[in-house]
Image (cartoon, rainbow, N blue to C red):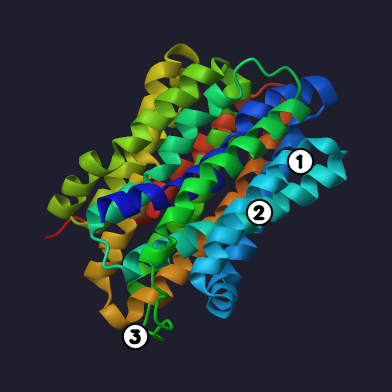
Amino acid sequence: MATKALLLALGPALALGLGRFAYALVLPLMQGAWGLSYAEAGLLGSANTLGYLLGAFLSHRLLGRTGYRWGFFLALLFQGAVLAFTGSGGFPWVFALRLFQGFLGALVFVGGAALLMTLGGSGRALGVYYGGVGVGLLLAPWILLGVRSPEAAWARLGVFSLLLGLPVLHTWPLLREPPPPARGEGGLGPILPLLLAYGLYGAGYIGYMTFVAAAVGEALLLFTLLGVGALLTGPLWGPWVERVGGRRGLFHVLLVLFLGSLPPLAQSLPVLSAFLFGLSFLGVITALTQAFRALLPPSAWPRAMGLSTAAFALGQAMGPTAAGFFAEVAGTGEGALWVASVLLLLALLPVLPRHRP
């Protein structure tokens, strides 16, 4: 099971680590070569997350029709081709391809998780799968090392994504199609504050990830630390969330994330900022899932996960545009980081610990 999870983890590593987050590394090249403004940069970031939102809404229907295995592998390989051609046109072309890559990324992420769960994957195996994002974060700066133009950067990301996606094909004989999703019953009122917090978290964290390299510099070091921190998410936050509960654990993870995002820390101690942020941003998913298990009956879990994915993707779609707008007003990338920190602070409010009499 561990080997299967490790190979499948290349899915989120490529579709999210390279496909989404490496945009922050290419962004300074795009701004220098194309004169891209912060507002335009934010729009391109939002295009990708808007595509992810559409993919999250349609993934189960599309994958149910094509088959989860076919849908997962086709989306994984095709998104590599999309990345390779992203730098070959003007702003409308880049916008359209960033939108499409986000859509394919959602199919990869949801499809791979569903296939792994069908195999009876444990929490540890799922943690390995989600932690694949950290592998992509580690690879991205090394893949782009020495690149001097956005066209070459996108081409290199696309080629490496296609090549690294090939080993995942070895899992094909081991995978089984998941059963049709069950329709859950029961009210979701207890988790509405969690959904609000998750949406605000999505907007805040993607704002930091999009603009931190442009605002602080040291892209290679920052993304290496983000990736290392992400790989340590499971061993750190998994046991803690089981000990304190999902809701309290969610507050704790978001608090560390907020502190790590603060611009004064990012400007003065970027190494600590990136490590704290990388250590925590995937821990939010672990805590949220644990909270759903505690607050809802099993029949309501599928519906809750669908709504949370939509809230998260909606926040991600709006976050880069808001951060880019305020960076444009401030005339510096630090303005984008302040927006990200404020959104993460707001995410803390719906999950404040309750004092029991």
The answer to which quarter of the image holds residue 18 is top right
Distance of label 2 from label 3 (alpha carbons):
38 Å
The answer to which quarter of the image holds residue 291 is bottom left
Q: Quadrant of the N terminus?
A: bottom left
Residue occupying image coordinates x 73% and y 42%: 44
Q: Where does residue 23 sit, x and y in percent of width and height?
A: 64, 35
Question: Which mark, residue 78?
Answer: 2
Question: Which mark, residue 186?
Answer: 3
Residue occupying image coordinates x 45% and y 12%: 268
Q: Which residue is mark 1?
A: 86
Front position in the image: 98 or 239: 98
SS label for mark 3: loop
Q: Where does residue 96 sit, x and y in percent of width and height?
A: 79, 51
Question: Which mark, residue 357?
Answer: none
Residue 245 to residue 80: above or below = below
Distance of label 3 from label 1 (alpha carbons):
44 Å
Is residue 331 left or right of 342 when viewed as pictured? right
Q: Identify residue type, mark 1.
A: Thr
Front position in the image: 109 or 69: 69
Q: Earlier in the sequence, mark 1 or mark 2?
A: 2
Q: Where does residue 116 sit, x and y in percent of width and height?
A: 35, 63
Is residue 323 left or right of 355 when viewed as pictured? right
Residue 98 to residue 153: above or below = below
Distance of label 1 from label 2 (alpha carbons):
13 Å
Is residue 124 left or right of 137 when viewed as pictured? left
